[in-house]
Amino acid sequence: MAGCRVGDAPATGRGTRRSRPPRPGLSGEHKPGALASVDSTLMTPGDERPDEPPDGAADGAADGVTGRPAAGPPAGPPGLTSADEAATLRTLERSAGDLMTTAQRRLEERFGWYRELPAQERSWVGLIAAAGISEFLRWCREPGRAGRLMADVFGSAPRELTRTITLSQTVDLVRSVVETVEEEVDRLAPPDQQAVWSLAVLRYSREVAFAAAQVYANAAEQRGAWDARLESLVVDAIVRGESDDETVSRATALGWGTLGPVTVVVGHAGRTRSDDAVTALRHVAGRHGVETLIAVQGGRLVVVLGGGDDHARVVSQLTPHFGPGAVVLGPSVPRLFAAGRSARAAMSGLRAAPAWPAAPRPVAADDLLPERALIADTPARHLLVERIHRPLEAAGSSLLETATTFLHVGRSIEASARDLFVHPNTVRYRLRRIAEVTGYDLTDPREAHVVRTAIAVAALDVPRSRTRRPRPADVDGPPDP
């Protein structure tokens, strides 16, 4: 009898069913006019009726083991098979306006998020609540509408509502509407129809819950695909050094409008699937409270980190998810609009990293200044001069002279003392001063190489106006008296 509509006569069976005592929880006897599917749903294994056809013989409509409907399309509502049930449905239809008012009042009383919504969003939520109640009544009359609930209930609200109302809030909305309908059914339905209508509400709430999940799943898929394209565009603009209004607008759409500080990390993509690597990178960064923008550009993997405090520590956790080779960490900048500077340094460092085989992994772009200077990276050359040569000049000619001599004689203190005509302790004192002024210890081979490169770059970058051409008097000696 399941699937009969209002006003249909009860189907005549192939045999006469035996009368059964009422099951626990039902008020009164299950009459022939009640929903047939209630009886089948309440059956348990071992309750088979002796005069029913064998398994599969009755149109294949029910599973022979449990008595429940066989697998197939989503189940519709149980059909209304008696005039009494049809009369109850008409009573509910006349009360639809009151149901909608009660549902909206319950939302207002229970949920602060609903009260705080702007007027337009509140009206959208009200439309969904009203549609949920009206569709329940139509659903009871038309069992085949189960597959249309997503469009009928949620189609009245715009797609933008999924950005305003969360899935958890939608669950609150569905629960309030279902509770309102249940209370009205308990009040209006006769005692012998309570189980029938309770099952109808239960099935309808299940279908609406699935429809809501489908709406949010579709929205998440579309938003994810759009955000992925938008993310790639933003990362590409950062790598190319673009910081126009369009890039800022796209970044703002991704939640990066005021996020800082920002650091760009560049390495090689691994052999694993890029989607798996991106997922792993996001997971690790998220554990440290850091936002990410990630793009795979050919064989290169670019990660933009935003927020958080210690990006260097986070990058050390991200490194295993890069491919073989160097992983270069650009300098941190305050906001995304300045991330091009971090990206340029990181990209230059990645190109120059092979010149330092013993480089750590990850390595800061500023630690690769000598190698970057070799590939004509102008900002790296300027940084070497500004950080090392200029401070040595400003501290006095003795420090610059000592550094040059110390490096020239193979970093020997005694040889430097002989060339400078000073005591070895004086050389040691000046080396300590050099470390204080520049931050580089000339007794360390790597740091000595950085200082040597800085001195060489400064010598090459001296403007011609500062190079005085020798006069004849300077070459030939003083004039005769």
Image (spheres, rainbow, N blue to C red):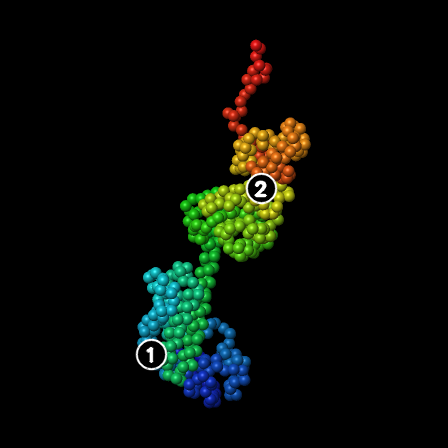
Is 105 on the left-hand or right-hand side of 48? left
- Alpha carbon distance from label 1 to label 2: 80 Å
Which quadrant of the figure contains the C terminus? top right
Q: Position of residue 277 (x, y in %)?
A: 56, 54
Disc tally is 2
Q: Nearer the viewer, residue 232 or 49?
A: 232
The local crowd at label 2, few if under 14, some if 14 to 19, many if 20 or more residues have their Cα within 10 Å, is: some
Whether residue 157 sits left or right of residue 15 in the image: it is left
Residue 196 picture location, percent across and down: 42, 80
Helix, strand or loop for disc 2: helix
Determine whether 140 is above or below 113 in the image: below
The amino acid type found where label 1 is placed reads: Thr
| Residue at numbered disc 2 | 367
For discs 1 and 2, the disc positioned in front in the rendered view: 2
**Where does the image place residue 25, in percent across and percent down from the top left?**
45, 84
* Crowd class of label 1 (few under 14; some 14 to 19; many from 20; radius 10 Å): some
Q: Which is nearer the N-term, disc 1 or disc 2?
A: 1
Residue 318 percent location from the top left of the image: 57, 52
At horizontal 43% and vertical 68% (from top left) the residue drawn is 171
Give the residue at x 59% y 47%. Answer: 362
The residue shown at (42%, 87%) is 28
Q: Which mark is residue 91?
A: 1
Q: Is residue 358 above or below residue 220?
A: above
The residue that appears at 35% across and 80% down in the rendered structure is: 188
